[in-house]
Image: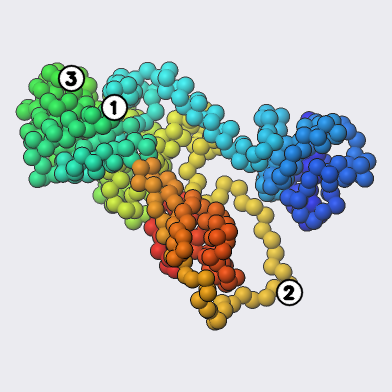
Amino acid sequence: MKILIPTGRLAENIVRKSVGKKADVLVVDIDIAAFINPKILIKAFQEAKIPKNYDLILLPGLVTGDFSEASEKLGCKIRLGPKQAYDLGFVLQFVEKIEFSKKIPACEFLIEIRKEKALELIRQTEEEAHSPLTLRGIKIGGRACMKIMAEIVGAMDLDTHILQIRIEAFIARGADIIDLGATFNTLPYQVRKTVSIVKTITTAPISIDTLDPELITEGVEAGADIVLSLNSTNMGIVGPIVARTRTTAVIIPDEGNSLESLIRNIEAANRLGIKKIIADPVLDPMGHNITESIVRYYEFHRMYPQIPVFLGVGNVVELMDVDTIGVNATLCGIGAEVGASILFTPEFSNKAQGSIQELKRASQMMQLSSIRGSSPKDLGLDLLCIKEKRRRFDFSLPGDAILARASKNWHLDPAGPIRIWIVQNSISGDGGVIVAEHEKASVVGKNAKEVMDTLLELEIVSCMDHAAYLGRELEKAELALYFNRSYAQDDVF
């Protein structure tokens, strides 16, 4: 395919370096490539006497306008390339595989196309997967994707409205199974009531999280799909009702977490007639024999590959003062290798917020990795939230640069002060809105640009230094929403 890349004078060197020999470059009579329009493009063709034998003209991604007439005159397709010239080398790898867009920059278009294809492959694989256990349509084990179990801590003490909000939020973030956590003070009637209520709220499988035989009995009789957890301390009491109701049981080892006691407890569950079993070899926290526990998982899965495995990721994440994204992804990868079918998280502490979404994406990545027989990279899905996969070219420091310094002169804007805060999306955990409050109006928007544009349009900002200040604060607020962090005006982000 013969490709032409039009650009402006300022970006010429970067474009030529990025493109190499993959395409030809046309430098038009303009400094900034984003200002190329149909007339400028046609004129550049005529002046440079460019032959009309190109298959594709790839414009800078920030160009706007209708190039359909120019496409007819120049005798080839015109599509949008990437926003940044640095990404041209990457984008050109796909020009013969994907039909680029006239409206969406190629860098964004590629991301969405690859993501859609990756998710479709996951959906197709999930439909075709054979699994030893299915709960309310959710496949567990076998070739099915690892499922996310999210615990609502202290669920029995919550009123119905709060419980519903929490469940809807967990489901929106990617939870497949809702776990209802009991406390030492939970009473039997609370378990029965809560399970009954939750069954009217969601169609997702429900688990009851306690070792107390009386609470387990109430949960099972109320219709819980899974009980966490059974071992020799409660098996003899609740085993018969779990077997009779064909409830799924997560079996754990006795104190000491030995592999031998886990196997004994599974054999005891089989003798009692419990057919639906998930094994939890117990993942120990960092600093408390985590390596030994991972080996225990590996050995169990090697011995009993047909039994679905429960991996308590929260045991590690909640007990580390570390950003959760990489930890969750790594534990998910380990889980995939040791046969994990369920990834458990309480998403309880502030630092662990977002774990449900992170584990969901990580499980999808591991599924794609397994399908393709590759490492979890270049899949179309990723968990790169802060660091870059491809770094743009660096520029050198200008020789005549002026050292910046903060101004000591600050004056209140005559138009009045503006207070900024954010309201986060309590359901999905993604996004939310920025609020900018002035005595004359309160402006609400999803990003810094639209809020600032509206403030200027309303003419409630009258000083350049105030506008610059607001721009900084609004951008911090937008970043806080993006990273699901708190925000306070004038605080360091």
Residue under numbered circle 3: 246
How are the residues colored? rainbow
Label 1: how many Cα within 10 Å (few below 14, some 14–19, many 20+): few
Asked if residue 171 lies left or right of residue 437, the reply is left
Q: Quadrant of residue 192?
A: top left
- Secondary structure, mark 3, is loop
Q: Identify the residue shown where x is 10% and y is 23%.
A: 241
> Badges 3 and 2: C-beta atoms under 8 Å apart?
no
Q: Identify the residue shown where x is 37% and y is 37%.
A: 172
Say which amino acid is labelled 3. Answer: Arg
Q: Is 320 rendered above or below residue 155?
A: below
Asked if residue 59 lies left or right of residue 163, the reply is right
Mark closer to the observer (3, 1): 1
Q: Is 483 rendered above or below residue 101?
A: below
How far across and down, in percent of the image, does residue 395 sit? 69, 61
- Secondary structure, mark 2, is loop
Residue under numbered circle 1: 203
Quadrant containing the C terminus in the rendered view: bottom left
- Secondary structure, mark 1, is loop
Q: Which mark sits nearer the N-terminus, 3 or 1?
A: 1
Residue under numbered circle 2: 400
| Spatial CA span between label 3 and label 1 | 18 Å
Q: Which mark sits nearer the N-terminus, 1 or 2?
A: 1
Say which amino acid is labelled 1. Answer: Thr
